[in-house]
Image: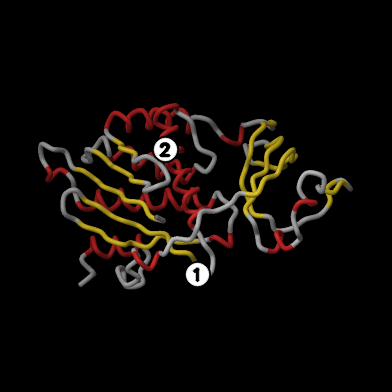
């Protein structure tokens, strides 16, 4: 299902230590982290936004968010699954290996830092359930401490000082044009197997090869060695789980702000 669930637990000794404002800000930062990850994927035809399906201020504080495609004719399930997987692996790798995910820019790192910091100051645990995309992630004070130490090391590095480099790997993207590079068509590996209609449909593809990064760490060029088409999962009927009137048309962040300020009836 195209959703995720955030549960925020207070310290067992004194539930009053968990303020509603802290819990709501924790949810807002988590929502923005999912948005940060989604922006790292170039898939405009599968664009979506998160809508709140339900929220409760009872202990534990729980919010359910459902992805809603901007184009109702497009199946976004595969894209949402990739975003959730990216968040799950990104947060886990930060905690367990001290590694920064490619989608974590400076703003995402600051939001992630704030989310982990609250788990050492008033929040006993933040549990993110990614539904079918990954195993649930529990952020307790120990995990939060490991992540914060990793972030300290990451932010100590000035990205502008990073030199040019070449790596091997794969990135995902959307095919929007086909042509020649240095007077060489990419037909032998891919073009002869697909029709030009694939280009205009904006099919999702994986490109494996040499990834050339400019100074500062920005990807500047891909020398493709292999291209594969990425298929998406069958459509899921969101109508069976989505309550379109739950937030009265407000986006999740604005809804939570107004709920906290007592502006909602």
Q: Label 1: few (<14), some or many (≥20) within 10 Å?
A: few
Residue at image point 55% right, 53% down:
232
Task: Give the image's coloring scheme.
Answer: secondary structure
Q: Nearer the viewer, residue 60 or 158?
A: 60
Relative height, residue 50 to residue 126 (above, below)? below
Residue identifier under label 2? 91
Residue at image point 33% right, 46% down:
129
Callout 2: SS = helix
Between circles 2 and 1, the one closer to the viewer is 1
Q: Nearer the viewer, residue 24 or 183?
A: 183
- C-alpha distance separating marks 2 and 1: 30 Å
Image quadrant assignment for residue 254: bottom left
Relative height, residue 197 to residue 140 (above, below)? below
Relative height, residue 104 to residue 58 (above, below)? above
**Is residue 171 toward the left or the right of residue 153 in the image?**
right
Label 2 with label 1: CB-CB less than 8 Å = no
The reply to whether residue 212 is visible in this rendering is no
Q: Quadrant of the C terminus?
A: bottom left
Relative height, residue 1 to residue 213 (above, below)? below
> Considering only order in the chain, which callout, 1 or 2, is on the residue closer to the N terminus?
1
Q: Which mark is residue 183?
A: none
Residue at image point 84% right, 51% down:
180
Residue identifier under label 1? 72
Callout 1: SS = loop
Image quadrant assignment for residue 197: bottom right
**Is residue 91 toward the left or the right of residue 39 in the image?**
left
Residue 74 image position (x, y, % from top left): 54, 65
Residue 148 image position (x, y, % from top left): 37, 32
Residue 126 image position (x, y, % from top left): 28, 42
Q: Label 2: few (<14), some or many (≥20) within 10 Å?
A: many
Residue 124 image position (x, y, % from top left): 22, 38
Residue at image point 55% right, 33% down:
158
């Amino acid at each position: 299902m195209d959703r995720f669930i955030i549960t925020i637990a207070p310290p067992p000794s004194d539930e009053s230590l968990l303020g509603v404002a802290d819990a709501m800000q924790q949810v807002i930062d988590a929502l923005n982290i999912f948005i940060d990850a989604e922006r790292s994927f170039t898939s405009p035809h599968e664009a979506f936004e998160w809508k709140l399906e339900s929220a409760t201020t009872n202990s534990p504080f729980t919010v359910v968010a459902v992805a809603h495609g901007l184009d109702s004719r497009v199946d976004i399930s595969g894209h949402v699954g990739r975003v959730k997987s990216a968040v799950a692996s990104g947060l886990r790798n930060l905690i367990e290996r001290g590694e920064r995910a490619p989608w974590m820019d400076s703003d995402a790192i600051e939001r992630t830092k704030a989310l982990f910091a609250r788990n050492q100051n008033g929040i006993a645990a933040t549990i993110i359930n990614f539904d079918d995309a990954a195993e649930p992630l529990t952020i307790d004070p120990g995990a939060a401490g490991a992540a914060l130490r990793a972030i300290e090391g990451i932010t100590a590095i000035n990205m502008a000082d990073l030199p040019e480099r070449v790596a091997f790997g794969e990135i995902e993207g959307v095919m929007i044009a086909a042509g020649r590079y240095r007077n060489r068509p990419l037909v032998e590996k891919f073009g002869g197997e697909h029709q030009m209609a694939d280009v205009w449909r904006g099919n999702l593809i994986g490109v494996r090869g040499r990834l050339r990064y400019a100074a500062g760490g920005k990807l500047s060029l891909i020398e493709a060695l292999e291209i594969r088409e990425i298929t998406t999962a069958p459509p899921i009927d969101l109508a069976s789980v989505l309550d379109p009137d739950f937030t009265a048309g407000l986006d999740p962040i604005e809804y939570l702000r107004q709920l906290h300020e007592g502006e909602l009836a």
